[in-house]
């Protein structure tokens, strides 16, 4: 998803179990929480995809919670229409306060108090049929408190060649079942009991509502509280990428936002002078090295040029955040 480039290891193959033999030993109740904002086609695709999930239904109870981040009903008609065809109950609510954190927290509030697990998926994604079952499978095998998986890009229109050649949207991949230090709300399941831990309330900080990084902030707190996070490489969702994201400008701007959000988050968890100095030095180095490499990168083609610009943007975003300034991309 991001720069700096995170370590990617070759995924290990685990034999896919048939839906009738998933290792679920007792009844499980799962709330699937979705925050949406002005994506009617996306929410229709997502709800239809959720209805096609393959699960051991006799032992798995599902509810779907959709929170529309609008002051007026935006996709209610679509939810009502699709809900008639979905196999599980769909609950719709409005969160009028603008911000992804507010919408996510509202969806968690509406989730059934008797749920064992909370799953979260974004409104621009569609899960594979075995998505939820694979998350549960890894949880049973590892005892994890949080399980997360990859988002595979699907371009709404064919991108320019340099986009795919550079792997700018390459999904995060790790060995199936491996422990990981982070999770993202585009593909995750976690114990509902986490929401009763006072160290994790509220789950998503409103400070990051318009900045982004609210999920990184939450799962950093989850990890620091001693909970275990693991990777399910077969629990895949498909992320729809619109044409306006497959551009150099969007990719560079996104890295500025990521650097900015990471700096603000790190300031909370590592506030010491030494830690701040190290972050400052690294950010300056990113900007200087990237700036010096721009002429050479330009001569080596679009991929190299965009990567150099991303590196500079990430460093500048970090410095902007260290100055206490927030880049509210989602405003």
Image (tube, rainbow, N blue to C red):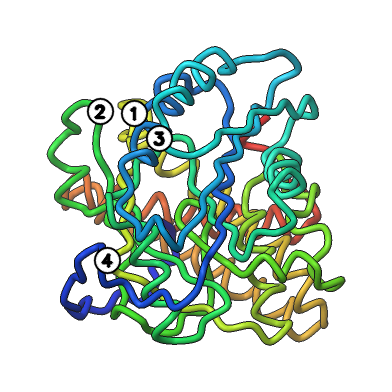
Give the side of residue 54 with respect to residue 301, left or right: right
To which residue does mark 1 refer? 242
Which of 146/301 is in front?
146
Point out residue 125 in the picture as x, y percentages from the top left corner: 38, 40
Mark closer to the chain start, 4 or 3: 3
To which residue does mark 4 refer? 234
Does residue 210 lie above or below 276 as drawn? Answer: above
Label annotation for residue 44: none
Task: Check if mark 2's residue and mark 1's residue have beta carbons within 8 Å.
Answer: yes
Task: Check if mark 4's residue and mark 1's residue have beta carbons within 8 Å.
Answer: no
Q: Quadrant of the N terminus?
A: bottom left
Residue at mark 2 to residue at mark 1: CA–CA distance: 5 Å
Mark closer to the chain start, 1 or 3: 3
Which of 115/323 is in front?
115
Point out residue 103 in the picture as x, y percentages from the top left corner: 70, 38
Residue at mark 4 to residue at mark 2: CA–CA distance: 23 Å
Q: Residue drawn 82% across and 82% down? A: 272
To which residue does mark 2 refer? 156
């Amino acid at each position: 998803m991001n720069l700096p480039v995170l370590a990617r290891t070759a995924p290990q193959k685990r034999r896919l179990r048939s839906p009738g033999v998933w290792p679920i030993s007792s009844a499980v109740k799962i709330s699937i929480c979705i925050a949406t904002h002005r994506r009617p086609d996306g929410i229709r695709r997502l709800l239809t995809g959720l209805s096609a999930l393959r699960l051991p239904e006799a032992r798995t109870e599902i509810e779907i919670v959709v929170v529309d981040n609008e002051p007026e009903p935006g996709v209610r008609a679509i939810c009502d229409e699709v809900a008639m065809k979905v196999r599980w109950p769909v609950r719709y609510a409005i969160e009028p306060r603008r911000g992804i954190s507010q919408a996510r927290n509202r969806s968690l509030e509406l989730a059934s108090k008797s749920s064992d697990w909370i799953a979260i998926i974004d409104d621009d994604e569609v899960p594979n049929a075995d998505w939820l079952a694979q998350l549960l499978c890894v949880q049973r095998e590892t005892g994890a408190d949080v399980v997360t998986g990859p988002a595979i890009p699907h371009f709404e229109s064919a991108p320019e060649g340099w986009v795919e050649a550079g792997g700018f949207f390459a999904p995060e991949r790790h060995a199936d079942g491996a422990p990981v230090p982070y999770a993202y709300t585009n593909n995750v399941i976690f114990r509902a009991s986490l929401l009763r831990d006072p160290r994790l309330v509220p789950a998503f900080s409103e400070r990051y509502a318009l900045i982004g990084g609210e999920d990184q902030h939450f799962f950093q707190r989850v990890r620091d509280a001693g909970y275990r996070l693991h990777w399910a490489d077969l629990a895949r969702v498909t992320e729809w990428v619109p044409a306006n994201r497959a551009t150099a400008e969007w990719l560079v701007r996104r890295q500025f936002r990521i650097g900015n959000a990471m700096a603000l988050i790190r300031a909370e968890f590592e506030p010491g002078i030494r830690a701040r100095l190290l972050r400052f030095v690294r950010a300056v180095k990113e900007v200087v090295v990237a700036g010096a490499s721009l002429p050479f990168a330009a001569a080596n083609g679009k991929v190299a040029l965009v990567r150099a610009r991303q590196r500079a943007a990430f460093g500048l975003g970090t410095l902007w955040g260290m100055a206490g300034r927030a880049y509210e991309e989602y405003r």
